[in-house]
Amino acid sequence: MTEKCGVVGVSLAGRDAARPLYYALYALQHRGQESAGIVTHDGFQQHSHVEMGLVGDAFGEGDLDVLNGTSGIGHVRYPTAGSVDSSCAQPFSVSFKSGSLGLSHNGNLVNADEIRDELAAVGHAFTSDGDTEVIAHDLARNLLEEDLVRAVKRTMRRVHGSYSLTICHDDTILGVRDPQGNRPLCIGKLEDGYILASESAAIDTLDGELVRDVEPGEMIVLEEDGQGFDSYQLVESEHTAHCFFEHVYFARPDSIIDGTLVYEARRNLGRKLWEESGVDTDVVMPVPDSGRAFASGYADAASETTADGEPRAEGDDGVEFAEGLMKNRYVGRTFIMPTQDERERAVRLKLNPIKSTVEGKTVTLIDDSIVRGTTSTQLVGLLKDCGAKEVHMRIGAPEIVAPCYMGIDMATREELIASDKTVAEIRDAIDADSLSYLSTDAVAEVLGKERIDLCLGCVTGQYPYDIEGEETDRDVSRPELGERPVFADD
């Protein structure tokens, strides 16, 4: 699984923004690896550098030196809407009569095609098939008629889907989060300015201090020269739709998202996993690196109670936590595996069991998810080939039964093993001795949210947005296009 993007924006006093943006993008590299870019503004003109590849590949020696200006935005991208080429790389830039516009987008619009067709009909020329350009053109059109706040509000009333945006309008930096808050966005204070970023880890990288999350439906405008920020609550929504998978998989463990440290959330999900489906084995081990925090919490809970929920007797330490699989971090995504034998060999290249931890023992293997089932099957086989007597699989999230339309490249229903198989059938397919997933209610409890305030579409098949051919979990419909929106406060 891959997440669509990471966004960042800064406004500083007395120094160029390019290098801090560059470091922040490194901190967000896990959110996208296809392209990276930075747009800055020096008070007179906009400067841009956008290339395909990782941050370290996209920026060469001297590239940052020409990105002048104390304000700017950055982006790392993994494409789930639009082509995999430079035309969809971001930040996306538009020059128009009222100035220049740079836009970075994390998320996915449901009605992008409808808005694109409408704008094209009145003369807008598009250079990509991505939804980010649609937002940029719609906002540019509104800026010709309205001030910044009203222009953004009009665009928010027209687009439907998930988005966290950082925008550079001339030398003004702003951040916008969709009314359901599906994608994360936070504000940080630096020594000489302010930052907007997808995750607080980017703020930490710049020795900054997390101020708070951007609220769903809120627009933040960073003051020039990094003196502060203004807040505008542009759209209200009865319920949020925070993506629970940010805490399960996508975000860095050291990030704080919607008030919760991701690492602690994963540990607590692991504790719940023991409470719901713990099994007393000789050892519990994570799939590195995705299952580590879950397994740590699971083992802690197992040291306190038995699998039946009874307190441990004195001297009974519960299930031993061990790192039984070692990861080779130098096998990249482009590893070529043309034959089945080589694909199986690739698993041993990426992960190798520690025989003394596994041989002759019963093992609980913990991961954050099972998507297609291929990797889980191979891992269970590896452990059994290494001498494990039993392998019990525990998953720190509910079964993924449906695709994500909100900016996560997950899989189609046909590829998702849980879309048409029961837990027992999946257990047999991966050859585990037992298999259990965490319940949806447990996820909501750990995150301190009501189920209706989470986006659970991938595990329930019901979505918080109006998606053609899919069920919704709330009363929601797409905006009606055509007439320009008129607001009560206009």
Image: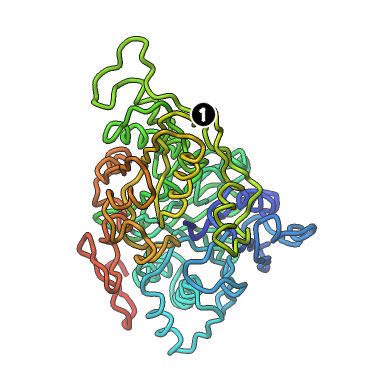
Q: Is any atom of residue 29 visible in this view?
A: no
Give x and y (percent) for residue 115.
Answer: 40, 79
In this orientation, which residue lies closer to the viewer: 137 or 478? Answer: 478
Q: Quadrant of residue 411?
A: bottom left
Which residue, as the protein is rendered here, is positioned at the far left?
475
Give x and y (percent) for residue 72.
Answer: 61, 58
Mark 1 burial class by Cα count in 10 Å: few <14, some 14-19, many 20+: many
Give x and y (percent) for residue 386.
Answer: 51, 37
Taking the image as shown, residue 100 lies to the left or right of residue 481, namely: right
Three-letter amino acid code at the position of disc 1:
Thr
In this orientation, which residue lies closer to the viewer: 307 or 402? Answer: 307
318 in relation to 160, above or below: above
The residue sitting at 57% across, 57% down in the picture is 341
224 in relation to 151, above or below: above
Q: Which quadrant of the figure contains the C terminus?
A: bottom left
Which residue, as the protein is rendered here, is positioned at the far right?
61
In this orientation, which residue lies closer to the viewer: 463 or 416? Answer: 416
In this orientation, which residue lies closer to the viewer: 24 or 294? Answer: 294
15 in relation to 291, above or below: below
The residue sitting at 31% across, 44% down in the picture is 437
Q: Quadrant of residue 306?
A: top left
The residue sitting at 57% across, 38% down in the picture is 326
Q: Secondary structure at mark 1?
A: helix
Question: What residue is disc 1 on?
Answer: 357
Taking the image as shown, residue 76 lies to the left or right of residue 365, namely: right
28 in relation to 189, above or below: below
Taking the image as shown, residue 101 lies to the left or right of residue 428, namely: right
Give x and y (percent) for residue 302.
Answer: 35, 25
Taking the image as shown, residue 58 lies to the left or right of residue 424, namely: right
